[in-house]
Amino acid sequence: MNRKIGLFDSGLGGLSILKELVKLLPNENYLFYEDSINNPYGQKSEDELLKIVDNAVKFLLKEDCKIIVIACNTATTCCLKKLREMYPDTIFVGTVPAIKVAYDNNYKNTIILSTPYTMQSSRVEELIHNYRRKDQNIINISGENLAHLIELDNKIEIMSLLNRKLSKYKDVTDSLVLGCTHYSLIKDEIQSILPNTVLLDGCVGVSNEVKHQLEEHKLLNNNSAGNIQIINSKDEKLVERSFGILRS
């Protein structure tokens, strides 16, 4: 039996990565654990988040996952290093804001929009330090409870928050880094406020790294069509919505 690629996030956000993975590796079996009961991750303490993330990892390992994708910027910046110490025989692939992509494409005025935790993390500070051009202006903005509003599908509050946070940058920014996988699900809404801004996320990069790791460890499945399983920690009724997003 072919083992699975496991992913987890605080709800829907990881679907943006799962979409890219299915395109790149259609023969793999996927198990996506949507931890909606603990949404949002970005407003948890480090100790609390590590316990939550550890439970998700334990669940995926019990389900015979050969690699675990942390499909969440907050969980990656907070927990990836610790998880690798706790589970030295497990392959982890994390998610970080696509700050390097902005650097590589020579953008001059970049917004980084992320959760409160990710915004203030040392990992983001490190990425900005390593990938900031001398002539590049970077604005680091907290998305506050945006991930939670996306989880609730509260379109009115989503647009209200986006307008409050982003409208003043309409004519002064050329790129925006989506520093939370949930935010990739509302690209159209963000683009409506910043129509001339390029939106950057790390989903393709994460998918390529997963493929690289599977090749490196000789774990690729090339023999049969794969399948997708989604489990929601809060309400299984939300799984149907997730498959709808996945198909869109």
Image (cartoon, rainbow, N blue to C red):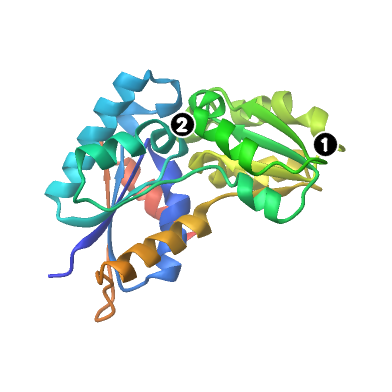
Residue 136 rendering spot, x and y as whole percentages: 79, 40
Q: Residue furthest bottom?
A: 223
Quarter assignment of residue 223? bottom left
Which residue is drawn at the image coordinates 36% and 21% (left, top)? 46
Judged by depth in the image, the label closer to the viewer, 1 or 2, is 1
Query: Is residue 70 depicted above or below 77 in this figure?
Result: below
Question: Which of the labelled discs sits on residue 170, or is there none?
Answer: 1
Can the viewer see residue 40 in this picture?
no
Tell whether 86 sits left or right of 95. Answer: left
**Numbered circles on residues, count:** 2
- Residue type at mark 2: give it: Leu
Which residue is drawn at the image coordinates 20% and 55% (left, top)? 65
Which residue is drawn at the image coordinates 79% and 40% (left, top)? 134
Q: Quadrant of the N terminus?
A: bottom left
Task: Determine the secondary structure under disc 2.
Answer: helix
Tell whether 215 sits left or right of 153. Answer: left
Determine the CA span between mark 1 and mark 2: 26 Å
Classed neighbour count for the residue bearing mark 1: other residues with Cα under 10 Å, few (<14), some (14–19), many (≥20):
some
- Residue type at mark 1: give it: Lys
Question: Which of the labelled discs sits on residue 48, or is there none?
Answer: none
Classed neighbour count for the residue bearing mark 2: other residues with Cα under 10 Å, few (<14), some (14–19), many (≥20):
few
Out of 27 and 236, give the one closest to the viewer: 27
Q: Which residue has dot 2 on it? A: 152
Can the viewer see residue 30 in this picture?
yes
Label 1 or label 2, whichever comes before in sequence order: 2
Tell whether 7 sits left or right of 194. Answer: left
Query: Is residue 3 depicted above or below 182 in this figure?
Result: below
Which residue is drawn at the image coordinates 52% and 38% (left, top)? 180
Task: Determine the secondary structure under disc 1.
Answer: loop
